[in-house]
Image (cartoon, rainbow, N blue to C red):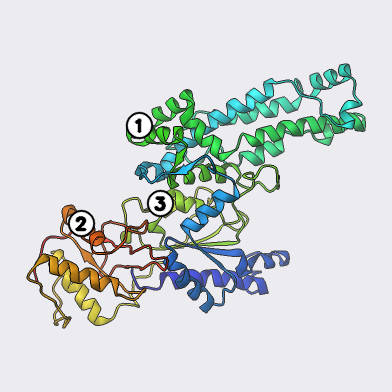
Amino acid sequence: MAGSGKTSVALGRLKFFANFRSGENAEEYGLRQEDWADFDASNMIGFVLSPSLVSYLQQTAESLELKGMKIQDFEEFLNRERNQRDIFSKPFKKSSENGHGEQKTITWLKALDIVVARYLADGILAIQAEPLLRPETNDGESITDSRWQDLVSTYWKKGTLPGRIRGLANGLTVKHSVDQKGFLIRGLARDIGQSVRLGDNEVGTLRIEERRALRDAVENVQLRMFRLLNPQEMFLQVFKDDAYRILLEDLCRQHQGSVADVVEPIRRRVSENKVTDDDIINALCLNALSCERFVRDIKAVRYLHAFAENVGVFIDEYQDFSELQVLLMGYKALSKYALVTVSGNSSQRLHKGGLAEITKAFPQISSPPRQILLDRNMRQTEPLARLSTCFRSLTDPTVAMPDSACRAPLAVYGQQQLFADATIAKILNLPEAASVAVICPNQDEVERFDAGRVGGGLSESNDLRQGEAHDALPHTFHHSPRGEGPRVPCCRRTRPFHL
């Protein structure tokens, strides 16, 4: 419920965890003393949808003494991860076209996962089919050609190593459906690191020079397989290679997805070196899945490190994010603790693509979520509640008219243009934290209002959302400090009415 204190309660949970740093309640939760330092507030992060909400969340966190907790809006987070992992830099350019809603879902990501797994399996087997090259090192040069061929025959063509590599590829090509749980490429970087290597028990009888040279050769192979996990290339190959694209199209058809609406626009964009935010999110989700629990730091491969780096993650108003946006933010939480806290209400979604079922977005967390229901509005005053009830009684036959008068000022305009001009002027002069409800009887009126909004001086912005409002008024309206304009939810399920 709006005004029930969801954000404060959720941040209070992080404050409880932050107190583990001093040992408070740590023993009850089975934490060892060496774990306590992990729970510093600086190791926690909170996410919001809009830049205008960052300062609010920071103030709330500071009031709870969560000093040093990082707060990011999603756009800042997305750009940071994209740049850090060098994904879709030049020559790619951002496209302004709107992606299909299907591209924002877990189901779509599962379809991508199946196709990408096939691409990776093909790449792994192709590398294994090549000869094992002798490393250009002092150890490698000390081994004769005939001896190297003996080593290759014994350890590369036979033995347990080639069996482990084939096992990796076979695990990526098992029959899988988008309806099944889990992802095929999940944790693949860690699996490559553990499987594509030679242990002491395998090469312990060799001379030290041979052992080092053989391990160097296998590590070079391992690095090549790591490079297959380039998230940009994984995403692009799905749409550039006919065989992989056809497989994706088949998966779309099996689940009533429109190939023309979903796959074809992406294929066209990437052929023109253009990407949308959804394309970037898709690639980063593939990166997060494949690098899960990968702990090595290979500086030569910028994208090869796990997303998880925070002991606690907080996502505010989860219903305003897509399934894949929430998945990506959730992957910032260390799997050791899996502390993800979200607040929101699926009935308050601002757009159809908003997340409705929160558990779908956390495939990396197996334990069931703990839910707390807050059903008392602590923010709405009684006069405002009566006004809200009055409006709802006019638009919803199940809501009764309040017994007492609202005593709210009511302006009446004889001309629609005067009404529109006055309304827009009032909105533009509101303080940053003001709330506004815009009620439209149908989609045509939503579009008319939108046209008047732009013509009247309210700028276009990525923050603008048109969705169905199901809860009591008022709904939130934010002025962005960057001058990006408002976020205006429009209620489409109302009937025309007169006051």
Nearer the N terminus, badge 1 or badge 3? 1
Q: What element carries label 1?
A: helix
- Residue 158 sits in quarter: top right
Kindly indicate whether the residue at mark 2 contacts the one at mark 3 (C-beta within 8 angstroms): no
Mark 1: amino acid: Val
Q: Do the residues labelled 2 and 1 touch (CB within 8 Å)?
A: no
- Dot 3: element: loop
Tell me residue 458's x, y (percent).
29, 63
* Residue that numbered label 1 is attached to: 259
Quarter of the figure with residue 70: bottom right
Residue 322 is marked as 3
Most foreground residue, 183 or 492: 492
Q: Earlier in the sequence, mark 3 or mark 2?
A: 3
Numbered circle sitting on residue 446: 2
Q: Where is residue 80 in the image (x, y as percent from the top left)?
A: 55, 54
Q: What residue type is labelled 3?
A: Ser
Kindly report the distance in space between the C-alpha atoms of the residues bearing marks 2 and 1: 29 Å
Residue positioned most to the left: 414
Q: Is residue 84 above or below residue 91?
A: below
